[in-house]
Amino acid sequence: MNIDINHLKVFEVMTRLSIDRASRALSKTLKTGAKIALSNIYITDLTGATEKMNEDTREMAGVMVNFHGNVACKLLFMLPMAGTLILTDLFLRQPIGTAKEFDEASESAIQEVGNIIAAHICNALVSNFDATLVPLPPIVHNDYAGVLFSSLLMEQGMNEESFLLIDTSFKILKTELDCYLFLIPELKSFEKLIDSLGVCV
């Protein structure tokens, strides 16, 4: 993947814009303060990232979204179960601590978060980068971090030794929740995006 610091800056602008918009939409949906913030964006080694995910032995709820268009990519958003249950309570307008286990309500909550993030990534790309992008219906998974991450890579058909990784923080009500957000564009799609902005890859 032949990407330098200038390319990452361009991608960071797009990603930060879409995540900020998703945060505002999520706050309105939950009727409370919610903030998903981009911490860092960088290229990481495939082997190292897989090992890191396998070391996280917590049960996760994750939502995976496939995007089709001229900027094809895949998204995976994961929360440990404790954070998922907090989201469930907020979506159901019930006191925090009410939800005790992953169920249909939890699945709906994490799916809605995936819908919100995916929709605003699409809007940012379409409106600011002249992209054609359509998110497919999100798929919710309940498993361990390493399993979900491996599923994302298999779905992506990764042929690269490295890929773009986004670090984010997720804060609801003053409580910071651990989360993982992976947005992996296909290399050719990323090159098209950069070319459309006049940045040579």
Image (cartoon, rainbow, N blue to C red):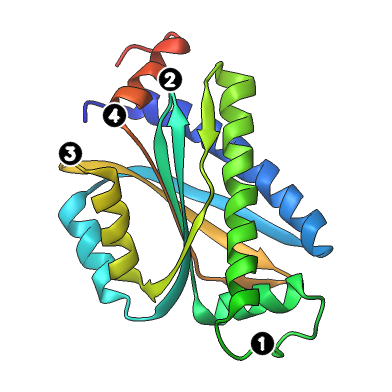
For the C terminus, which image quadrant?
A: top left
Q: Helix or strand or loop: what does disc 3 sit on?
A: loop
How far apart are the alpha carbons under marks 1 and 3? 40 Å
Looking at the image, tell me whether mark 1 or mark 3 is earlier in sequence order.
1
Q: Is residue 192 above or below residue 66?
A: above
Looking at the image, tell me whether mark 2 or mark 4 is earlier in sequence order.
4
Task: Specify the label residue 99 is tagged with.
Answer: 1
Q: Amino acid at mark 4?
A: Leu
How far apart are the alpha carbons under marks 2 and 4? 10 Å
Q: Helix or strand or loop: what does disc 1 sit on?
A: loop
Q: Which residue is mark 4?
A: 187
How far apart are the alpha carbons under marks 2 and 1? 42 Å
* Nearest-to-viewer mark from 1 and 3: 1
Q: Amino acid at mark 3?
A: Glu
Q: Residue at x 60, y 44 (%)?
A: 19
Q: Is residue 165 above or below residue 68?
A: below
The picture places residue 199, in percent across and down from the top left corner, at: 39, 13
**How many labels sit on residues?**
4
Looking at the image, tell me whether mark 3 or mark 4 is earlier in sequence order.
3
The picture places residue 114, in percent across and down from the top left corner, at: 57, 54
Front residue of this view, candidates 64 and 172 = 64
Q: Amino acid at mark 2?
A: Leu
The picture places residue 112, in percent across and down from the top left corner, at: 64, 58
Asked whether, in this view, residue 163 is left or right of residue 67, the answer is left
Tag 4 near tag 1, CB within 8 Å: no
Looking at the image, tell me whether mark 2 or mark 1 is earlier in sequence order.
1
Q: Amino acid at mark 1?
A: Ala
Q: Helix or strand or loop: what does disc 2 sit on?
A: helix
Q: Is residue 197 above or below residue 30?
A: above
Q: Which residue is mark 3?
A: 160
Tag 3 near tag 4, CB within 8 Å: yes
The picture places residue 94, in percent across and down from the top left corner, at: 80, 82
